[in-house]
Amino acid sequence: MKKQVITSRDVHLFYGDFEALTGIDLAFNEHEITAMIGPSGCGKSTYLRILNRMNDLIPNVKITGDIELEGKNIYAPDTDVVQLRKQVGMVFQQPNPFPFSIYDNVVYGLRLAGIKDRAQLDEAAETSLKAAAIWDEVKDKLHESALSLSGGQQQRVCIARVLAVRPEVILMDEPTSALDPISSTQIENMLLELRSQYTIILVTHNMHQASRISDKTAFFLQGRVVEFDDTKKMFLNPKEKETEDYLNGRFG
Ligand SMILES: Nc1ncnc2c1ncn2[C@@H]1O[C@H](COP(=O)(O)OP(=O)(O)OP(=O)(O)O)[C@@H](O)[C@H]1O
């Protein structure tokens, strides 16, 4: 049986009085890609942000329940949130490179951690850019601005920036929805390569993407998880009527 890297039990989240998540039980296995699907506003991004405490930055948020990374409650008072976000990295919908060179973007987290050794930084930059499947395109212009790259290239540099700090888990919030089909395919192929080393949790609106690359799928509806299963099983033979209707495009 695969190791569960993140588990959540009975997770509720309130924005003020509004209960956006109404009791989420999910577990994420190592070396798997889990897709979270569901109609707009059902709470996918809210739930994703819980997993590396990004909701801490939003005022009037209250979270209850239990979320553990490697068996440790990530909301315990002694949690080092900076360390947590290294272990659980995040890639956003819009590529968000810093206005620095490609190289400086990728080694940003390592420098923040106090690493100054040039050889070590060079090695990390090359390894991460290779893993993010963009090394060949940028190796001759590492010191040019990351903003000069295309959207798809910027997104892969952002993924390399996350990989450089060696996370265990990578959270992705619709990482290809702002990209053209070729760039999206490049990123999907990369994720399939990365799966052997990471736990990947992906919010997507793209049903084809979920069925192509994910091992497991969680279907969210109005703040709850309707169904969570192997992707193949769910797409071929959903257990719940609501899942079937959604997958067949009857709503959402
Ligand atoms: N900062 C916030 N303050 C108050 N309500 C919020 C906030 N962020 C999200 N919500 C509400 O919480 C619910 C869930 O939103 P969330 O963004 O998690 O949904 P989603 O499934 O990711 O949607 P989409 O697919 O459109 O991104 C929605 O009703 C939304 O309006």
Image: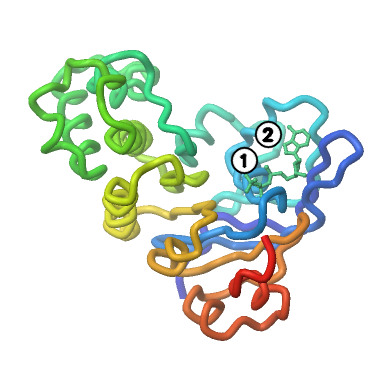
Q: Badge 1 local density, few (<14 within 10 Å), some, or many (20+)?
A: some
Question: What amino acid type should be assigned to the residue bearing mark 1?
Answer: Arg
Image: 55 above or below 1? above
Residue 55 is tagged as 2
User: What quarter of the picture does the C terminus occupy?
Assistant: bottom right
Residue at 33 percent across and 55 percent down: it is: 188
Q: Position of residue 174 (x, y in %)?
A: 49, 46
Would residue 124 be seen by someone viewing this image from the given angle? yes
Find out whether the residues at labels 1 and 2 contact each other: C-beta distance under 8 Å.
yes
Write down the quadrant of residue 139 in the picture.
Answer: top left
Which residue position is annotated with label 1? 49
Residue at 72 percent across and 74 percent down: it is: 242
Viewed as shown, does residue 115 lie left or right of 209?
A: left
Residue at 25 percent across and 26 percent down: it is: 149
- The answer to whether mark 1 is within 8 Å of ligand 1 is yes
> What element does badge 1 sit on?
helix
Q: Nearer the viewer, residue 34 or 189?
A: 189
Viewed as shown, does residue 76 lie left or right of 197?
A: right
Q: Nearer the viewer, residue 231 or 32?
A: 231
Q: Earlier in the sequence, mark 1 or mark 2?
A: 1
Q: Position of residue 82 (x, y in %)?
A: 53, 27
Write down the quadrant of residue 123 in the picture.
Answer: top left
Question: What amino acid type should be assigned to the residue bearing mark 2?
Answer: Asn
